[in-house]
Image (cartoon, rainbow, N blue to C red):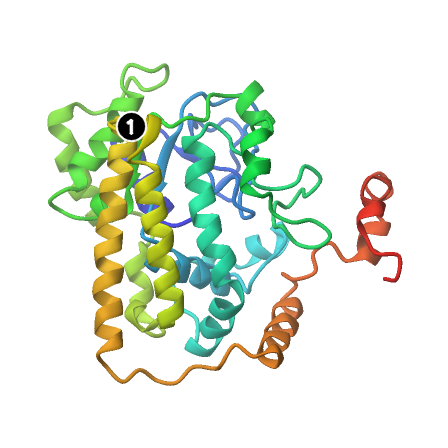
Amino acid sequence: ANGMRVTWQHTEGISGVRVGDDFHLGEKPYVNERSGLIKTQYPHLEGIWSWGSNMDQVVLVIRNPRWAIPSYHTLLHEIYYAHDWETAYKYLNNLFNFRAPIDKWIKWRDYRFDEEIDLWMWHIDFWMEGGTQYWMDLDYERNGQYPFRYLTQFEKDTRDKDLHCIYDMDCFPKAVVTYEKLIDPDSGPSELTKIAEVLRNKEGMEGLVGENAIACVWHQTWEQAKYPFNSNRDKSGPRAQEYLFTVKQMEKMLKKLLFMIDKYSSGHWANHPLAMDLVASFNMYFEEVTTELEEKENTAAPPTRAPTPEYHKELITWYSALGRGNRYDKAKVQQMYGFWPLVAHLYKDTE
């Protein structure tokens, strides 16, 4: 969910084609709009597959989880932790305007971290592996909440791919774009060129700028962009660097990054161009997180709540009060008359 705004504004700049949204949350209705590009967070629970079979190529955008996870929480806070389309749309103008109080970040971080770092990995795997499904079929929100759960590695390896990737489009990316490289003045134009080459000579992309103009468009996009970028949040609330992780969380983040480095540099991925792009970025992320962890271990950090059962209960209560927990409440699901018979057996009789 992170880095999308930068990517779509640069993509519009080089193509002259409007980038659509999977929830159709744009400034104007998309009826009669020329939109041959869609940005989406699918299969993350914040995204939906709304384009049917009308798209045929994928560009995967990645970002360091050290910054992607706090940025995702900031977005949630800006839309008041919306869990429905109407609420999200109501607060749409809040986006990229302020950051959350640190105390809310800590609660959300401590409750969600383990799952969010896994979702970061699984999102990459989904696209790189052409649609590896990590959620149960009837889990329509793809959130892994009771009575559902996320699939084990064995289950993911032995089941069919997401049906969208079988019948609607080839889900394997044509290019991998790294957010940190895209926003860097030195590497940004080269990273944007990856997107341009995916689009070049495709139907509807006749207005795509030439290779020599990409650097100019990249710089002009920063200066002329109609909508604010992530840095606009610096005007209100804590600085991005104040949203910290615990030592144990950073150690787990490093283990996950090492796993991804090993996975995409060995076996059939060895020497694959897209996998090499991924590994280069993963190594960059690993070095950045390692440096921060070393600094953290050498300084006196403020104390954090111990992960006691009581603290965990507090977090569950807080998260549920936001409307984002217990999404498959039994009483709610029982009112879904076509759905309830399919899942009734998953609920405990004593509930």
Q: Is residue 164 left or right of residue 178?
A: right
Horizontal and vertical percent position of residue 91: 53, 59
User: What residue is drawn where x is 35% and y is 44%?
Assistant: 260
Taking depth in this image into account, of 289 and 10 the one nearest to the observer is 289
Looking at this view, is 250 or 158 the one in front? 158
- Label tally: 1
Please, what secondary structure does the residue beneath circle 1 have? helix
Query: Picture quarter containing residue 340?
Result: top right
Residue 338 occupies which quadrant of the picture?
top right
Q: Crowding at label 1, few (<14), some or many (≥20) Cα neighbours within 10 Å?
A: many
Let me know if residue 120 appears in the view: yes
Where residue 4 appears, as percent x and y from the top left, is 37, 45
Amino acid under disc 1: Ser
| Residue hosting label 1 | 15
* Horizontal side, residue 170 vs residue 133: left or right: left
Residue 137's place in the image compared with 310, above or below, is above
Asked whether the viewer can see residue 245, the reply is no
Image point 29% across, 17% down: which residue? 206
* Residue 135 appears left or right of 285: right
- Relative vertical location of residue 317 with respect to residue 254 in this rendering, above or below: below
| Residue 216 image-quadrant placement | top left
Q: Which residue is more in the foreground, 123 or 219?
A: 123
In the figure, 165 relative to 312: above or below? Answer: above
Q: Position of residue 39 (x, y in %)?
A: 43, 37
Quadrant of image for the C terminus: bottom right
